[in-house]
Amino acid sequence: MAKLSPPFRAALRGSGAALVLAFLAFAFHAATGIGDEALFGTWVYCAVMLGAAASCLARAALVRRERAAWLLVGAGLLAWTGGEIYYEAALAAAGSVPIPSPADIGYLLFYPLTYAGLIVLLRERIGSFPFTRWLDGLIAAASTSGSSLETATNLAYPIADLTLLTLVISAAAFTGWRPGATWSLLGAGLIVLAASDFTYLLQSAQGTYVEGGPLDAAWPLGALLLAGAAWVAPGPRRRVHPRGLRVAGIPVAAALLAIGVLAGERVDRLPAAAEVLALITLLLVIGRLALALRRSDANLASTEREALSDELTGLANRRALMSDLSAAVAQAPRSGNAHLLVMFDLDGFKAYNDSFGHPAGDALLARLAERLRAFAGERAEAYRLGGDEFCLLAECSLGEAGPLVAGASAALCEHGEGFRVDASQGNVLIPGEADSREGALRLADTRMYANKSRERASAGSQSRDVLMRAQHERRPELHDHLLDVAELARAVASELGMDEEQRDEVFRAAELHDTGKMAIPDAILNKPGPLEPEEWAFMREHPLIGERIIAAAPALVPVARLVRSSHERWDGGGYPDDLRGEQIPLGSRVIAVCDAYEAMRSDRPYSVAMVAARALEELRSGAGAQFDPRVVEAFERVIGRSAAEAPSKGRARDGAA
């Protein structure tokens, strides 16, 4: 609630307590007859009603949240109180009270104002309130009949009570039948008011109503319950969508009541007003059901679109492809035309995602999808199967297949500074090369990955061969060392559960991790003693130099990233970026362990080769400091499974620096 000063809060509590005491005094008088009727029946009664209205208006003035709702409810109670005051001042002493009277205007104004206030309150609490729920209230109101103006006025009270209760029931449904304290108090207050109005109407018709009796205490009790609801702290807003009988119960019950009225007319002629109201009720029910059907159709269409489309790109999804492909397989033999199925897998997307982040990767997928959609146009259907996999399905002649494949492949390519994304594809013609949905998918998938492997081997292997040859010419003695490190790294990567593409990247990075040393002078590389600080600074540049050289080949960008981090330490003491722990790429952590082991097992200018057991012991002692403990454990398992250790070879300094 509002942040009020302690004295102000105390004043509000005192006013509330005084209001409750005044009501209890009035209720005691109504039940026992003790006390002056003029004092209690007029002054105390009107004071309680006026206090209830003032309580709601004070809530609206002091608390911004839900202000409009409680202002309307307070205005409704104030209008009711105005009707009471007019009645006591001008009509109570009259021998005959006209119906309707000006007092009825005040009484009846309570209902539309409160109805509007409850609508606003419900919108505040659940975020929205459909037009159909307003219509339910009108249906409930129209389903009751009347004849003369006097009868209509008398019936207006229970009808209006029924309308308000309809709204409260709707609110309970929209909150999942967990209305909370506010709506419980509102419901209790409206039930009390409805019960008192029905009882008053029945007693008046029977001539048994006695003014000043116990029934008179029900109206101020209902008003106080409404006022109390205003000061209950509102909970968090929540959006609940009731379904089924929760929503349909009100219009269905009203329709049955209207049908009963029309059926009763067959037995005993009812006034024309009753027939008209019953007919209006049925028309409203028909309109209500039409709106429900329209919304249901819209929801169904939306659900179908979501079920058959990809959320990120808007293209058709795998489920849609399976359906369309089944239709294509069934249609092909009859139409005589072939259907072309093309599956695509993006090359370089993983590196792009790693370099620029997942939001940028999603944006790239959306751009490529839009280009594929534009290319497909009306002659083909484009799909996203998930991740970086796309698909195209088109009915075409054999001569059109080649241009379609080439155009779709071009649509899925994007090049920029530091990245290159292309698409490997596999295509199949239906029914010429496959006569079933599963067979077409399997053949296209096989061809796509064969194409992908060839392209990767072609681009990556050529660049790798050039760099390996350059290293061999610069330092021939390192060739065997690099191959041993690469084979170990691939085995450890497999032990750690890395997939085929990741294992391939680790292998290539291990082969090329010393590429940057081609820029380091031999005097530093072959120095038999410790390096000077300025020499160390120069040596620490070689991972960055290696990254720049390797990344010049777009197919080796992921490899270059692993080379850059291959001399980082688990505890953060490595170089060039001072990465630590999981910040270091897993492939780089694997290379660091394998490189260190091979370096310790080799003769170097400043030390002799260690035996295998001693080298493993050094790795264990460095686990948690220099090396990732999990990688060291995987390395030990790989070595333990080896049939025999490779003999130590005399090698030049490899710079496991």
Image: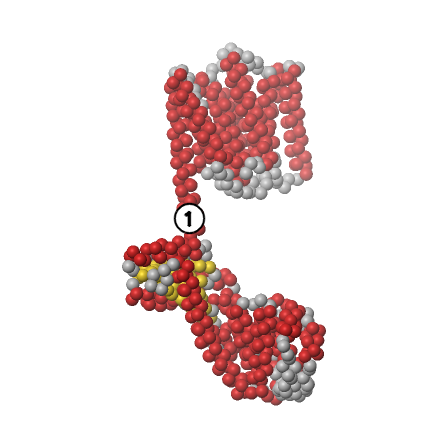
Identify the residue position indicated by label 1 in the image: 304
User: Farthest residue in the top direction?
Assistant: 95
Give how far across and how far down residue 296 sits, in percent: 42, 41
Q: Residues within 10 Å of mark 1 (few under 14, many from 20)?
A: few
Nearer-the-camera pick, 603 or 125 = 603
Amino acid type, mark 1 = Glu
Nearer-the-camera pick, 353 or 137 = 353
Q: Is residue 524 visible to us here? A: no
Q: Residue at x 41, y 64 (%)?
A: 443
Q: Is residue 29 left or right of residue 240?
A: right
Location of residue 13 by image quarter: top right
Give how far across and how far down residue 591 sits, in percent: 60, 75
Q: Is residue 451 left or right of residue 172?
A: left
The quarter of the rendered structure image containing the N terminus is top right
Q: Is residue 451 above or below residue 308?
A: below
Q: Is residue 296 above or below residue 253?
A: below
Q: Which colour scheme appears in the figure?
A: secondary structure
The quarter of the rendered structure image containing the C terminus is bottom right
Give how far across and how far down residue 189 sits, in percent: 57, 28
